[in-house]
Image (tube, rainbow, N blue to C red):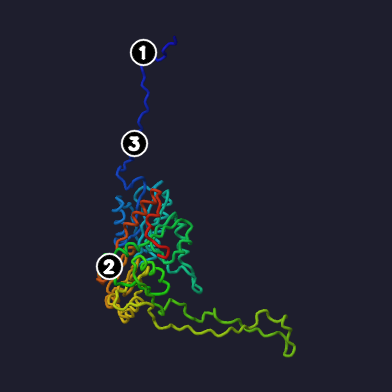
Amino acid sequence: MPKNRAGPHKFSLSHPQTPKLSYGYKSKMNVGRSGYRVFSANSTPAGSELAKQITERLGVELGKSVVYQESNRETRVDVKESVRGQDIFIIQTMPRDVNTAIMELLVMAYALKTSCAKNIIGVIPYFPYSKQCKMRKRGSIVCKLLASMLAKAGLTHIITMDLHQKEIQGFFSFPVDNLRASPFLLQYIQEEIPDYRNAIIVAKSPSAAKRAQSYAERLRLGLAVMHGEAQCAESDMADGRHSPPAFRPSCGPPGLELPWKHQAPFPGIELPMMMAKEKPPITVVGDVGGRIAIIVDDIIDDVADFVAAAEILKERGAYKIYIMATHGLLSADAPRLIEESAIDEVVVTNTVPHEVQKLQCPKIKTVDVSMILAEAIRRIHNGESMAYLFRNVTVDD
C-alpha cells in the first residue's frame, strides 16, 4: 500500500479570489450595456441638446469631457474619463459657427484616438459643406477634403442623415450610414396637417423632383414641379475659360509663309456662337388650385427661393403652403422672411439647433429624430443589422 504523503492533514485547494482594484475611482461610470461611451463635441449648451436627448433614450450618461475655446480662439478638448478599448460615439451638431464645430469634432476625435479608444463613430446629423460636393470652375470639392480630415483624425464610422447628395458616401474610406428623416416628416403630415388628403407635393426645382415623388407615392398624393427659377447656375464671368485659343501667325516674311504642316500646331479656332443663358419664367407643372401645397427639400437655409415659390403657388390657387425639410439652417434673416411671407408653416427636424429662430418666428415647427439616431448607435455597438431603420425608405428618398 503506498503511504499517504500528506499525512493526517487534508488540504483543500482553491483558487484565491483576486481583489478588485478601484484605484480610487468610483465604480459607477458612464459605461453602456457592454462598454461604450457617448460624448458631445459641442462647446455650447444649445449644440449639446440633441446629445442629451439621445443619451436619455439610450439610458446612459453623457461622457465627461470639456470642450472650450481659449482666449486666442483655439479649440481645446479635455476627456475626463478612461475610454481605452471602448466604442466611442461623438455627437456633433452644427450651429451657426460651422468651422468651429468642425474643429471641435476633429480635436475630440484625435484626443480619443490617442487615448486608445477601440472605435470612434461620429454622429453628425447634418454633414457640413455637403453642398460643395461638385467641382465648379476653379473651386474645389470641399466635402471630399472634410472626409479626408475626419479619417485622419481617427474616425472609423459616421452616422449622418439625409446627405445633400448620396454620392458623398463615396468620399469616405470608412462606412457611412445615411439615415432618412422622411418617415418622421410623413408622420407629421398625416397627424398634424388637417385634410392632408387634399394636399399636393411640390418640388421647388427639377433636382428635387425625385424626393418629392418619393413623398407623393407614400402619401398617395399628386405631384407638382416648379422650374424656371435660378438653379445656382455658374455665372458667365470672364475668367479665361471661354476664350478661344490665340491666333498664332505663320513665321516668315509676307509671301514666304510655311506650308500648313509646318505652321503653329494650334491656330485660332472659331467656335459656333452659343445662345446666351436666359432664365425662363417660373412655371408650375401640375394643378395646385384649391389645394394644400407641401414643398419638400433636404436643406432650408436661404429662404428667398422658398418665399418666391410660395408666392407663385398662392397665385396659382394654393390656399395653404407648408415647407418640409430635414435640416433647418435658417441663416441670416430667414425667420423674418418666413414670418412676412405667404408660407403657413415650416417643419424641420432637430438635426441643427434652431431654438433662437423659433422664438423669432412661430411658424417654425420641430420634429424630433433623436429616436432613430439612438437606435442606430445601439445597433452599431451590438453589431446588429441597420436594415430595419431603412424599411420604409425608397431608393429615391
Which element type, helix, strand or loop, lies under badge 2? strand
User: What is the number of the mark on residue 8?
Assistant: 1
User: What is the number of the mark on residue 365?
Assistant: 2
Kindly give the residue lying farthest to the right in the view shown.
256
Q: Amino acid at mark 1?
A: Pro
**Residue 128's spot in the image, x, y percent?**
40, 65
Task: Give me the residue at 43% from left, 52% from top.
Answer: 113
Residue 203 vs residue 231, the one in the foreground:
203
Kindly give the residue lying farthest to the top in the view shown.
1
For label 3, the residue is: 20
Kindly give the residue lying farthest to the bottom in the view shown.
255
- Label 2 or label 3, whichever comes before in sequence order: 3
- Label 3 or label 1, whichever comes before in sequence order: 1
**Residue 326's spot in the image, x, y percent?**
35, 66
Find the distance from the CA under tag 2 to the CA under tag 1.
Answer: 85 Å
**Residue 3's spot in the image, x, y percent?**
43, 11
Q: Nearer the viewer, mark 2 or mark 1?
A: 2
Which element type, helix, strand or loop, lies under badge 3? loop
Q: Amino acid at mark 3?
A: Lys
